[in-house]
Image (cartoon, rainbow, N blue to C red):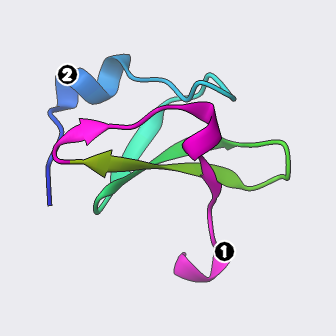
Amino acid sequence: MANLTADLLDVLRCPQTHSRLVQEGDELVSTAPGPDGKPLRYAIAEGIPVLLPASAEPADDSEN
């Protein structure tokens, strides 16, 4: 699992909601809901956040 630095997380924003992102395992999760009312998840591939809007997936409520 790649741990992103606090400095990097301070500047990263969700490209769709423009909210802050928090790291959960190997994913970044938006702190604001996306168009379907759920936070969006973005993969971290080889230590690099993949913040392409097309790659976002709605967060699964069962994980919380």
Kindly identify which numbered label has been placed on residue 11.
none
Q: Quadrant of the C terminus?
A: bottom right
Which residue occupies the extreme bottom position in the image?
62
Q: Measured from the top left, where is residue 45 in percent x and y?
A: 26, 48
* Number of marks: 2
Q: Could you say where residue 52 lies in the image, as x and y percent from the top left? A: 53, 31
Residue 50 falls within the magenta-colored stretch? yes
Q: Secondary structure at mark 2?
A: helix
Residue plotted at (68% across, 28% down): 16
The magenta stretch is 46-64
Q: Is residue 58 above or below residue 28?
A: below
Q: Residue at coordinates 59% horizontally, 24% vertically from top-left?
A: 15
Which three-letter amino acid code belongs to the residue tagged 2?
Answer: Asp
What is the crowding at mark 2: few (fewer than 14 residues within 10 Å), some, or many (at least 20)?
A: few
| x, y percent for residue 48 | 24, 36
Few, some or many residues within 10 Å of mark 1 (<14, 14–19, 20+): few
Of pointers 2 and 1, the one earlier in the residue sequence: 2
Does residue 40 appear to the left or right of 4 in the view shown?
Answer: right
Q: Tell me residue 30's x, y (percent).
A: 56, 42
Q: Which residue is mark 1?
A: 61
Q: Is residue 32 left or right of residue 43?
A: right
Q: Residue furthest top?
A: 11
* Magenta segment includes 3: no
On the image, which quarter does residue 60 sit in?
bottom right
For the residues labelled 2 and 1, the Cα–Cα distance comes to 28 Å
Assess whether mark 1 and mark 2 are in contact (beta carbons under 8 angstroms): no
**Is residue 41 toward the left or the right of residue 4 in the image?**
right
The quadrant of the image that shows the N terminus is bottom left
Label 2 sits on residue: 7
SS for callout 1: helix
Residue type (three-letter) at the residue carrying disc 1: Asp
Which residue is at 62% across, 55% downward? Answer: 57
